[in-house]
Amino acid sequence: MAKKQLLTKKSMDFLEKYLNNASPTGYEWEGQKLWMNYLKPYVDEFITDTYGTAVAVINPKAKYKVVIEGHADEISWYVNYISDKGLLYVIRNGGSDHQIAPSKVVNIHTKNGIVKGVFGWPAIHTRSRAKEEPPKPDNICIDIGAKDKKEVEKMGVHVGCVITYPDEFHILNKDKFVCRALDNRMGGFMIAEVARILHENKKKLPFGLYITNSVQEEIGLRGAEMITETIQPNVAIVTDVTHDTTTPMIDPKKQGLAKIGDGPVIAYAPAVQQKLRDLITDTAEEKKIPFQRAALSRATGTDTDAFAYSNGGVASALISLPLRYMHTTVEMVHKDDVENVIRLIYETLLKIKDGETFSYFE
């Protein structure tokens, strides 16, 4: 594919709508509907499961199956306790960061719609300078303007209501995408763009392509674990985000070196099938797609692990999008990296052969 701007106005309109929609872990279906509607012109059929994973399929009758995958969910909170004074205490749904919570506006999802609230925090004037207490999961709380517990319940808020941040998509300095939930709806967006480009370029693949947007990654790769048993793929190329380690307070000697704008990050890990990974790196070099490398100890911590160790072993690889400020409401990626992840997956797919086993013993 010639190097040109990939993202169209239609792509960007979809991305903004998709990111701004709330899809917390366990409640991903509204986002999945948006995703499926965007993909409908480019694929042959859809598969869904009872927990909300969505799969768009090209060439579904083919015996040989290749997955490209991202995950749809975002971190959030649950209402865990309502005090007599009408304040809400929370527990995590995924890896929500308690230190960024104070002074954030939140959306509390109820049967009657959204109830607004704020994570309150004591004014600086009232806090002890000698013993400054940091935000902790047991001392942050949400104020919805209710005078007591009875009024909270009258507003439709109860224990178990899920809570998300409303922060919306914007662009910094023309080429930095910023929003909550880039981890990992950018993955769902990028694999959707691969399907679009295959369709627009009239490419016919010799295998079935399963464009998979899994649920519940943030609490243990659960959606991928379920859907891989349904699809039973031969190959899986997973995309997720990884840390830009050039930002303050991160040690590249411990975390490895990756930087937004320098290209996709290709993982080296036991779950990554080496011959498949080599196909990806060789493709990047041939097509002059910039890329970075990351060594991951033991597990990748992504849906790659779920696919790799399923069904007797599935040849799997991980292509990551470098991201700043993970699990905050200002996650940031570079537009060039987004386009290059799309290019790399697209070009790799064109090199996979029907029936290829990636065996080390051939």
Image (cartoon, grey):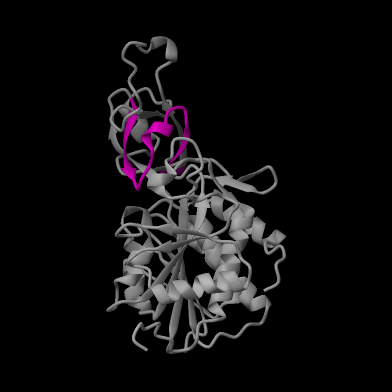
Q: How far from the left and from the top, in percent, is residue 309?
A: 29, 71
Is residue 51 among what the camera can see?
no
Closer-to-camera residue (109/294): 294
Horizontally, residue 121 falls left or right of residue 247, namely left
Seen at 36% across and 59% down, the residue is 300
Picture quarter with the C terminus: bottom left
Closer-to-camera residue (314/264): 264
Seen at 36% across and 45% down, the residue is 95
When the figure is inspected, residue 313 is found, relative to residue 292, above or below; the finding is: below
Q: What stretch is highlighted in magenta?
A: 86-113
When the figure is inspected, residue 191 is found, relative to residue 332, above or below; the finding is: below
Specify whether residue 250 is painted magenta.
Answer: no
When the figure is inspected, residue 318 is found, relative to residue 228, above or below; the finding is: above
Picture quarter with the N terminus: bottom right
Q: How many labels does the image show?
A: 0
> Could you say which quadrant of the image residue 109 lies in?
top left
Is residue 197 among what the camera can see?
yes
> Could you say which quadrant of the image residue 343 lies in?
bottom right
* Residue that lies at the very extreme toward the front in this rendered image: 253
Seen at 54% across and 60% down, the residue is 264
When the figure is inspected, residue 100 is found, relative to residue 62, above or below; the finding is: above
Horizontally, residue 279 falls left or right of residue 203, namely left
Q: How far from the left and from the top, in percent, is residue 305?
A: 33, 65
Q: How far from the left and from the top, in percent, is residue 201?
A: 68, 78
Seen at 39% across and 81% down, the residue is 234
